[in-house]
Amino acid sequence: MLEPLVFLISGILKAWHLAIAAVPGVSVSAAWTASVILLLITVRLALLPIAYQQLLMGRKTVNLRPQFAAIRDKYSRSIEPNAAKYQKWAMQELRERNGISTWTGLIPPLVQIPVFIGLFRMLRRMANAGAHGSQGATESVGFLSGDEVREFTSATFAGVPLPAYIATPEPQLAELGTTFADVFAVCAPLIVAAATFTGINMAISINRLRRTLDHGSRFMRGTYKYMVTMTFFAVSFPLLFGFLGPAPAAIVVYWVCNNLWTMSQNAIITIILERRHPLTAEFKALRDHTRDARRDDRSKKAKGRREARSSRWRALAGTIRQPSRRTELWDAHRTFLADRDAAAKAVTDRQRAQQAKIHQTRQLARLLRADSQGRLPNLGGNTRINEAWRRSAPPPDAADGRAGDDRIVGKLGKVAVRMTLAKNEHDRRRTGGRLSARRKPGRGRGRGPSAGA
């Protein structure tokens, strides 16, 4: 699957090697080492616009979060039967108006990950080809012939062969013409530098996510905790694989250059975004509000747990001091827990009752309105009553001062009363229609014999 990428990347590497080798006075080892570094720079420059676009779309989405929250709040309390559909349309319209595409955030990883895997795989194959000496490297890799692969495996970096790694057995190091001390002296600082650059890059990303974190979303809070945890593993991987695994010097050089580029790119793009697209005051207010609400909720839960523990310890200590009051003390503890659970259940029941009320009103409106609105309503105003139930609605009050065609949906209770009256009128007409339909066949059968006679 990644073989086409190996051919593409090996072609770029070969082109750079031919260009550098043509310069007078450049050795073979320097040409191959510089070719690997320039190959990495070429690939990262090609992917730079995609990486910038990904972070830019993320920043725009973050700044629009207050407007998304306003749309969700509007339609979560709306009695419009098609509120969910209108909410989706409104969010999509807001994204299109600000040039945000959902697929923009998915394309960069789909492009970058295969390219990086193909680059790493090509370097790994070339380095492993000379693990037992450059004479054993006869297999071609992509556009690189066997002779070019042998040149690569015989090249050195700071006097260390590119296929050598720290965990290489002594016999293989002897075949490569080097020693463990030489390999360790060159590769160990590079491995530590690669891990350091990775840690700094992760710190920049975590700080950016922390400043734009949606504290009201459990998924985003989990993502933030996951990134903090993964920082340890991201830093540990180069250290463990570099010192204990088969990480040739060519891969170590690639790691250092790639991680240095990633760290610099991440820092520069973050600075550019902060200057050109800073966080808006509306977003900061929403972020602080959700963060404070989250902290208050956590403090209330922690206070409830502390009070429950205190009540339990009071009951336990009182039982030890006065065994005769054991039943009384534990009954008081159970009463405290029951009152706490009842208070929490009352809050949940009120929320569910409000949601059920809105849902029932939506269902009633859906029954009364045969034709729902065909276009997105104005987000800045109210939604006019549809003709489907205005025909059966009671006339407006004289004191209202508004004509029937200009009536606007008001409070939930008033709308529910009007819809209930309209539903009763609708049921009465439907019942009358059914009764008249039942009488007609009877009268027809009664007239049939007379007509036949």
Image (cartoon, helix red, strand yellow):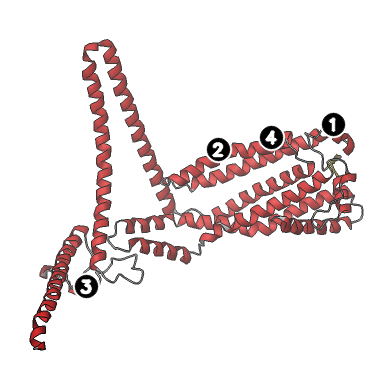
Q: Is residue 16 left or right of residue 49?
A: right
Judging from the image, what secondary structure is the residue with disc 2 in? helix
Report the disc number at residue 229. 2
Q: Can residue 51 be seen in this snapshot?
A: no
Q: Which residue is mark 4?
A: 240
The secondary element bearing badge 1 is classed as: helix
Q: Nearer the viewer, residue 55 or 101?
A: 101
Q: Type of residue at label 2?
A: Thr
From the image, state whether disc 3 or disc 4 is nearer to you.
Answer: 4
Q: Position of residue 166 (x, y in %)?
A: 78, 34
Amino acid at dot 4 = Leu
Measure how far apart labels 2 and 4 are at the Cα level: 17 Å
Whether residues under marks 3 and 4 lie with C-beta atoms below 8 angstroms apart, the answer is no
SS at mark 3?
Answer: helix
- Cα–Cα gap, marks 3 and 1: 91 Å
Residue pictured at 70% horizontal, 48% vertical: 258
* Residue at numbered disc 1: 170
Indicate which label's residue lies in the foreground, 4 or 1. 1
Q: Is residue 115 visible?
A: yes
| Amino acid found under the numbered disc labelled 3 | Asp
Residue 406 — which label? 3
Q: Amino acid at mark 1?
A: Glu
How far apart, in angstroms, are the residues tagged by discs 4 and 1?
20 Å
Image coordinates of residue 281 in percent, x first then y, are: 43, 53
Sequence-wise, which precedes: disc 3 or disc 4?
4
